[in-house]
Image (tube, rainbow, N blue to C red):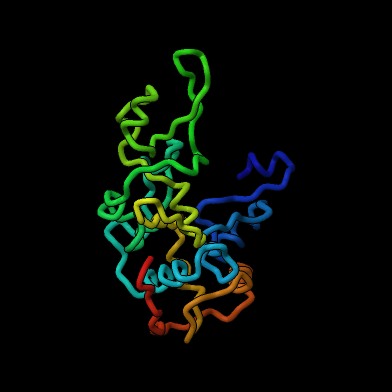
Amino acid sequence: LEDMVALGLPFWLAGDYATPEKLAHVRSQGAHGIQVGTLFAFSNESGVDETLRKDAIHTVLNEVAPEGGWIFTDPRSSPTGFPFKAARIPGSISEESIYLQRKRICDLGYLRHHYKKEDGSVAQRCPAEPQADYVKKNGLLEDTVGRKCLCNALMADIGMAQIQASGQKEMHLLTAGDDLNNIKRMIKVGQNSYSAKDVINYLLDLDVKPQPHINPPVEKSLEL
């Protein structure tokens, strides 16, 4: 941090800093603040589909986390090749069995790569598209292993899941950070959700800390 402070420019820290204790510490060291993603992503004002959001909150509050925790940093899922953090929530393509049920299709194309064809023209391909199609475009088969269609999955996260011609409904994949467990500190007695204002009050330590409680049951959706 000393090097950052020495620059004399404002800076913020990111990566599991979303607690009042860590915010106070980094500000005392010269940082202007922190980046907060996960806590806001599961707040009422978030663009995440309400049913998915509440089901995820209910799961984290009331279920035992899988071995290794709720978050898995997957080195293979993103077509971009960058590691992708996803919540290991039942009913999403974070589950291998559900991922394998999906028929590969690339129809949104937000993460397609440009490549040069043999005739010198430029075309697009995606490691998450049908494997035969990718290989036909001079892609390597090994590059397709474990790739997930984040385009369709993230659209499903915001309630805009496509229904494919086969009748298949695109499934979601909730992305979240390592501090997902901190949503437990956001839920007050008798509630099963929280607001963006609650997040700000929590981080600035302006609110009474939630007391231990048993959460009310959340009505589960019949179809995710």
Look at 36% across and 31% down and name the residue there.
133
Question: Can the viewer see residue 21 in this picture?
Answer: no
Q: Furthest residue to the front? A: 165
| Residue 198 screen position, x and y as percent | 59, 74
Q: Position of residue 122 (x, y in %)?
A: 52, 22
The N terminus lies in which quarter of the figure?
Answer: top right
Toward the viewer: 70 or 51? 51
Residue at the image point whose x is 46% and y is 60% from the top: 179
Residue located at (50% from left, 81% from top) = 188
Q: Residue at x 57, y 81 (%)?
A: 208
Q: Quadrant of the C terminus?
A: bottom left
Expressed as whole percent of the image width and height from the top left, the position of residue 31 reads: 66, 52
Q: Residue furthest right?
A: 8
Q: Position of residue 152 (x, y in %)?
A: 45, 50
Q: Is residue 163 above or below residue 224?
A: above
Total number of numbered discs in the rendering? 0
Most extreme residue toward the top is 119
Q: Nearer the viewer, residue 19 or 82?
A: 82
Of residues 187 and 101, the one drawn nearer to the viewer in this rendering: 101
Query: Is residue 61 shown left or right of residue 142?
Result: right
Q: Is residue 28 left or right of residue 178?
A: right
